[in-house]
Image (cartoon, rainbow, N blue to C red):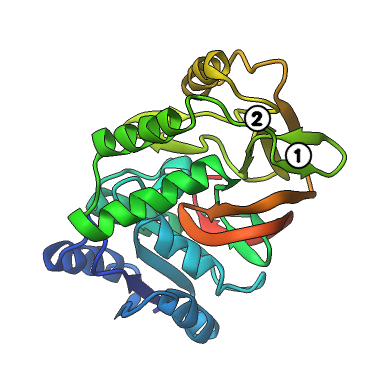
């Protein structure tokens, strides 16, 4: 019988003991399951690295932070990854068409595992840290930082809290963001969004489509507004929810292997919704066909 490991973040918002048991039973119909709970930040990376050689698949029941940690512990020749949504947003499994309900997702992924339905996908890398769907400098990274602060004080913030945080940030800047970074070969920009998949993220059920041509099988896409004023903010928000009408002043690249950015001052950096601190420079790279995932081909 195949052997799989189930890595669980017990603190993720959609994870509880009952659901863990149901997920275990579902996967157990097709494989011998070993369940391991993460205990601290970075633990999922350590577990993936240490267990990958002994299993036929790695299942992760977590939010996007857990998926990100695990992919940073998997080698190119490692076992396929199955992502069970356990967070509030869970962008990556949704981008793969996996059901949002954890039990339905486990049944879906168990069937894919039994059928050996595997896709090879590109992963991004920024300053050595892998990411699955998105990374950004300044605007969305600052949002991630503020949301994490809110989370530590009051639990997981909902969509209303996210929107309130975003509009507060815009109000503080009076809707104006001057160019503070230089993108090699493109020019200066106010902030940067780098996508490895479409959508870039979700706001509730609403996909945020900052790079609608991005694909998990191609290189990286990026969009960077050159100068942002109050009028441009409204256009960018409309573009984000429709994927159409990109402002002419925005810089854009599609399906590239490398993006080098230098900042006028240290700026916030995020990858897959994880705060990576402030950086003076960021190098984004595409690792093509780097990881196997359980998904419909």
Residue positioned 51% across, 35% down in the render: 199
Front residue of 14 and 144: 144
Q: Is residue 69 visible?
A: yes
Q: Position of residue 221 (x, y in %)?
A: 69, 38
Is 242 placed left or right of 206 in the picture? right
Query: Which residue is label 2 attached to?
Result: 213
At mark 2, the secondary structure is loop
- 89 to 14, vertically: above or below: above
Is 102 placed left or right of 60 in the picture? left
Residue positioned 58% across, 15% down in the render: 244
Q: Is residue 118 visible?
A: no
Q: Which residue appears farthest toward the left when viewing the image?
A: 18
Label 1 CA crowd tier, 10 Å (few <14, some 14–19, many 20+): some
Q: Position of residue 95 (x, y in %)?
A: 47, 41
Give me the C-alpha separation between circle 2 and circle 1: 9 Å
The disc label shown at residue 116, or none: none
Contact? badges 2 and 1 (CB < 8 Å): yes
Residue positioned 21% across, 61% down in the render: 15
Query: Which residue is label 1 attached to?
Result: 255
Label 2 CA crowd tier, 10 Å (few <14, some 14–19, many 20+): some
Q: Quadrant of the C terminus?
A: top right
Q: Earlier in the sequence, mark 2 or mark 1?
A: 2
At mark 1, the secondary structure is strand
Question: Based on the displayed image, in which of its 4 quarters is residue 100 positioned?
Answer: top left
């Amino acid at each position: 019988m195949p052997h799989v490991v189930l890595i669980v973040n017990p603190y993720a918002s959609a994870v509880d003991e009952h659901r863990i048991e149901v997920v275990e039973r579902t996967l157990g119909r097709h494989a011998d399951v070993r369940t391991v709970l993460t205990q601290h930040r970075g633990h999922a990376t350590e577990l993936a690295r240490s267990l990958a050689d002994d299993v036929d698949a790695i299942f992760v029941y977590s939010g996007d932070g857990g998926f990100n940690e695990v992919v940073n512990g998997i080698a190119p020749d490692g076992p396929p990854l199955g992502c069970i949504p356990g967070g509030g947003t869970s962008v990556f499994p949704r981008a793969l068409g996996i059901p949002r309900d954890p039990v339905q997702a486990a049944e879906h992924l168990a069937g894919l595992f039994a059928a050996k339905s595997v896709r090879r996908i590109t992963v991004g890398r920024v300053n050595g840290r892998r990411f699955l769907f998105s990374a950004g400098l300044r605007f969305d990274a600052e949002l991630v930082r503020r949301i994490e602060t809110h989370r530590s004080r009051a639990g997981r913030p909902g969509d209303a809290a996210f929107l309130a945080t975003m509009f507060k940030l815009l109000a503080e800047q009076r809707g104006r963001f001057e160019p503070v970074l230089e993108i090699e070969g493109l020019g200066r920009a106010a902030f940067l969004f780098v996508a490895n998949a479409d959508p870039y993220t979700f706001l509730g059920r609403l996909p945020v489509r900052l790079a609608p041509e991005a694909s998990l099988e191609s290189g990286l896409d990026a969009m960077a507004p050159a100068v942002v004023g109050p009028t441009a903010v409204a256009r960018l928000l409309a573009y984000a929810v429709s994927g159409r009408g990109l402002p002419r002043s925005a810089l854009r690249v599609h399906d590239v292997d490398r993006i080098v950015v230098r900042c006028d001052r240290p700026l916030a950096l995020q990858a897959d919704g994880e705060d990576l601190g402030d950086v003076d420079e960021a190098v984004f790279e595409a690792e093509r066909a780097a990881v196997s995932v359980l998904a419909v081909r």
